[in-house]
Image (cartoon, helix red, strand yellow):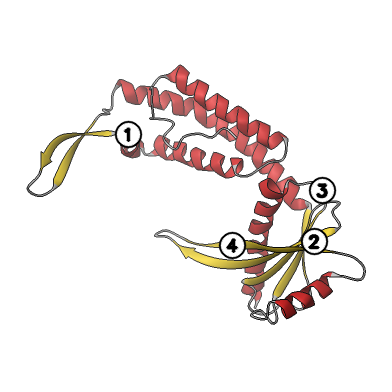
Amino acid sequence: MKTLNFNWLTDGVLDFEYKKYVLLAYLTAVKEEFAHKRLYPAFADLIFHYHNLLEIKQHKQLLYEKFPQKISRADFSKLEMMYKKIVQDDETMTIIEEIVQFALPQFDNLLANGKEIYEHLAQHIEILPIGITPFYADEGYVLLNEYADKDTKVYRYQISIFESMHEKYRGVNFEYLETVGYSLVNTYENIKVNLAKKYKNLPNPATFAVCAKIHCPLEYALLPITKRSLVQYVSKINATA
C-alpha cells in the first residue's frame, strides 16, 4: 500500500497543490484497502497522521520540531551546537495551515469509514472461553477459525502492560503454533487438552476460541481485530476476578 511519509507535511517542496496531490494519492490508496476490508495497517496509519495534524493545528509551535535545521554557530570547546530554525512564522506557516485545513476533513471522512468497517467486522467475530478460565488469563491460547474454514489456527498469546509518561495500556503478542483440524471428534476442548499436554509450561492455560462469521482478511483485519478484542475481553475477566 502507498504510505505517507512521517514528515509529509514539511518534507520536500512546500507547495499547497503538491501537498494536496501527495495527500489525495495516499487517501486513494487507503480507500482501496478499505474497499477490500484490509483495515490494517492502513487504519492505524491513518489515525497516526490524523492525530499529528490535530496537534499541529492546536499547537503550532510543535511544527518547528518537524522541520530540518541548519547550524548557525558551533561551540567546539563545549561540543555544543546552536541551531537556527529555517522556518519562521510567516508565509511558510500560512501554507502549512492551509494544507492542514484541507487535510483534516479528508481524514475525518475516511476515519469514519474505517471505524464503520471495523465495527461491522468486530460484530461478526465471536470470542468464546474454552473450559474453565483460570484467574491468570494474560497468557494462553487462541483457537482461530476463519469464515468457512474447517481448520483451526492455534496461537499462543501473551498480554503485557506498557507504561508511558501519560498513560498505562495493554498490548498483546501472538505466536503462531500450528493448524489443526476441527470436528465433532476433535473439539475445542480436545484441542485445549492436547495443547496442555504438548506445552507443559502452561498446564491450565486460558484458552479462547475465535470464530469469524463473515469473510475477514486474516493478516489485514481478522488478527488485528482479534488481538484488540481479546485484550478487552481479558481485561473484563481480570476486573471481575
**Badge 4: how crowded within 10 Å, few (<14), some, or many (20+)?**
some
Residue 63 on image: x %, y %: 35, 36
Q: Nearer the viewer, residue 47 or 98?
A: 47
Residue 88 on image: x %, y %: 26, 27
Q: Which residue is mark 2?
A: 152
Numbered tag placed on residue 214 in the rendering? 3
Residue 228 position (above or below residue 7): below
> Callout 4, which amino acid?
Val
SS at badge 3: loop
Residue 119 position (above or below residue 203): above
SS at badge 4: strand
Screen quadrant of the N terminus: top right
> Callout 3, which amino acid?
Ile
Q: Which residue is mark 1?
A: 67
> Relative to residue 84, is residue 111 drawn left or right?
right
CB under 8 Å between callouts 1 and 4?
no
